[in-house]
Image (tube, rainbow, N blue to C red):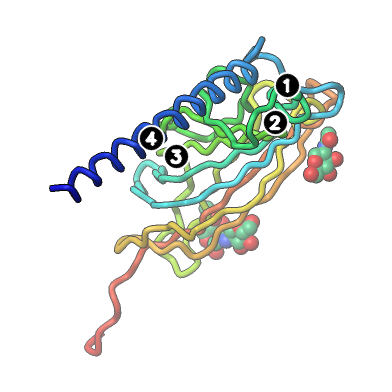
């Protein structure tokens, strides 16, 4: 009985302490979020002359469908976008904030308007619309997406397979305002499929010029080399 009572007291004591620490933290976090979002304007490109440097990568998790009749494929992938927004930094601001990163609603801050030009439907975003902001103003946004895009699948059942290329770029900014660089395609989380083989992945960053304008535009091309999986040949073939 006494032991139980002691346990209960200890439990209540720990719970109270945890609560106190938690409410202090909550207050700090609230102040920090208010500070980070002060006067935030999602339309404002966070630059002073130099282009905003954005890094784009893809973590491919699955190939959902290959439609050879329509020439379309559907994939699941986590697209990683990294950039720096000095307006969000709380470093050296002597506010006494902790170094811990915060999660914020992506719609409340500026984010790169990078789209896949050859997507057939708007990508379906399967993850919460949250980004991580670090003390130095670096932002990491990793939407998990279902993307359907066009691809010439003429050679899908040959040994070389087909190259399906996703072309990413900014919708409104040229490279002098927002510069995009392709980082890598990861297949560490890729779920193998009984129907298709993923032979290779490629990522390249290209600079292009249009007739209209003298400014350079960047495109990041992500290519998936896929092939139809064939049943093994048996001895009587
Ligand atoms: C399919 O393979 C043939 C023969 O190698 C090649 O000439 C053709 O360009 C390929 N088609 C596509 C869409 O890559
Ligand atoms: C796919 O694209 C890569 C990179 O552009 C190229 O090296 C490779 O030969 C292509 N493969 C096929 C099957 O078209
Ligand atoms: C964009 O970045 C690449 C390398 O990351 C660099 O070579 C290029 O000059 C940059 N473009 C502009 C317009 O700053």
CB atoms at circles 3 and 4 under 8 Å apart? yes
Write down the quadrant of residue 95 in the picture: top right
Residue denoted by label 2: 137
CB atoms at circles 1 and 2 under 8 Å apart? yes
Of label 4 and label 1, which has the lower sequence position? 1
Q: Which mark is residue 87?
A: 1
Viewed as shown, does residue 64 lie left or right of 3?
right
Which one is in front, 147 or 209? Answer: 147
Q: Which mark is residue 196?
A: none
Q: Is mark 4 within 8 Å of ligand 2?
A: no
Res 35 visible: yes
Residue 226 coordinates in the image, percent (x, y) = 45, 59
Q: Residues within 10 Å of mark 4 (few under 14, many from 20)?
A: few
Question: Which marked residue is nearer to the observer: mark 4 or mark 1?
Answer: 1
Under circle 1, the secondary element is helix
Question: Which marked residue is nearer to the observer: mark 3 or mark 1?
Answer: 1
Q: CA distance from mark 3 to mark 1?
A: 26 Å
């Amino acid at each position: 009985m006494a032991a139980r009572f002691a346990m209960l007291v200890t439990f209540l004591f720990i719970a109270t302490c945890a609560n106190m620490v938690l409410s202090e933290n909550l207050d700090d976090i609230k102040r920090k979020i208010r500070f980070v979002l002060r006067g935030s304007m999602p339309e404002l490109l966070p630059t002073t002359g130099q282009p905003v440097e954005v890094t784009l990568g893809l973590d491919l998790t699955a190939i959902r469908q290959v439609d050879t009749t329509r020439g379309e494929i559907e994939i699941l992938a986590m697209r990683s976008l990294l950039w720096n927004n000095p307006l969000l930094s709380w470093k050296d601001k002597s506010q006494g904030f902790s170094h811990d990163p915060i999660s914020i609603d992506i719609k409340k801050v500026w984010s790169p308007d990078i789209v896949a030009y050859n997507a057939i439907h708007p990508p379906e975003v399967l993850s919460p619309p949250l980004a991580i902001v670090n003390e130095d103003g670096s932002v990491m946004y990793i939407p998990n997406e279902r993307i359907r895009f066009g691809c010439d699948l003429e050679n899908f059942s040959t040994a070389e397979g087909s190259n399906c290329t996703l072309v990413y770029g900014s919708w409104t900014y040229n490279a002098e305002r927002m510069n995009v660089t392709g980082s890598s395609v990861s297949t560490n989380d890729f779920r193998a499929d009984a129907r298709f083989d993923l032979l290779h992945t490629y990522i390249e960053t290209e600079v292009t010029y249009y007739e209209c304008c003298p400014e350079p535009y960047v495109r990041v091309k992500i290519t998936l080399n896929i092939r139809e999986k064939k049943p093994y040949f048996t001895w009587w073939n």
